[in-house]
Amino acid sequence: MKNEEQERQSIQHHNHKIYFLVIIAGRKQKNELLTMLTEAGTPIINTLYGRGTVKTGYLMNLLGIVSEENKVVITSIMTDVKTDTVMNMLVEKFGFNEPNTGIAFAVPVNGLLY
């Protein structure tokens, strides 16, 4: 009975599309983002550090457009279901739909070579 259930889960898992997810945000959000990805069951997470290129001036500060210079780039590989969950959490919990909060995008992966 267990073998049939494991085989069914394996077949269902193979029917999911795989995505390469990229999240770019301020370094201050790194720990919260990694915790959220871990709790969502993300199997592979890679973290890189970067520096933003936007230079803030008087007018940008006046308009409230202040970019954090130190960035974190988090990449991950996950199924379409987890990608949808993570993207929704980025909007709901981290406000990624608002300016100056972060950028996230997912690219479909047709296959993996290892």
Image (cartoon, helix red, strand yellow):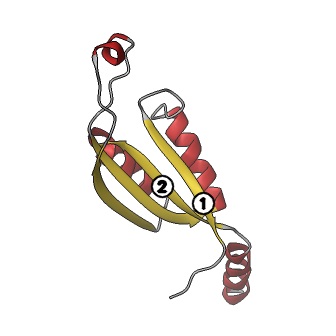
Q: Report the residue that reaches farthest toward the top.
A: 62
Q: Residue at x 45, y 34 (%)?
A: 94
Residue 67: image quadrant is top left
Considering depth in this image, is 1 or 4 the residue closer to the camera?
4
Residue 20 image offset from top left, x and y in percent: 54, 63
Q: Residues within 10 Å of mark 2 (few under 14, many from 20)?
A: some
Residue 17 image offset from top left, x and y in percent: 68, 68
**Mark 1 = which residue?**
107
Considering depth in this image, is 37 or 1 the residue closer to the camera?
37
**Mark 2 = which residue?**
22
Q: Residues within 10 Å of mark 1 (few under 14, many from 20)?
A: few
Residue 23 image offset from top left, x and y in percent: 45, 50
Q: Residue at x 67, y 85 (%)?
A: 2
- Marks 2 and 1 in Cβ contact (< 8 Å): yes
Q: Earlier in the sequence, mark 2 or mark 1?
A: 2
Residue 68: image quadrant is top left
Element at label 2:
strand
Element at label 1:
strand
Considering depth in this image, is 81 or 104 the residue closer to the camera?
104
Q: Amino acid at mark 2?
A: Val
Q: Horizontally, is 104 left or right of 38 in the view?
A: right
- Count the marks: how many? 2
Gap in angstroms between the C-alphas marked 2 and 1: 8 Å
Residue 107: image quadrant is bottom right
- 89, above or below 57, in the image: below
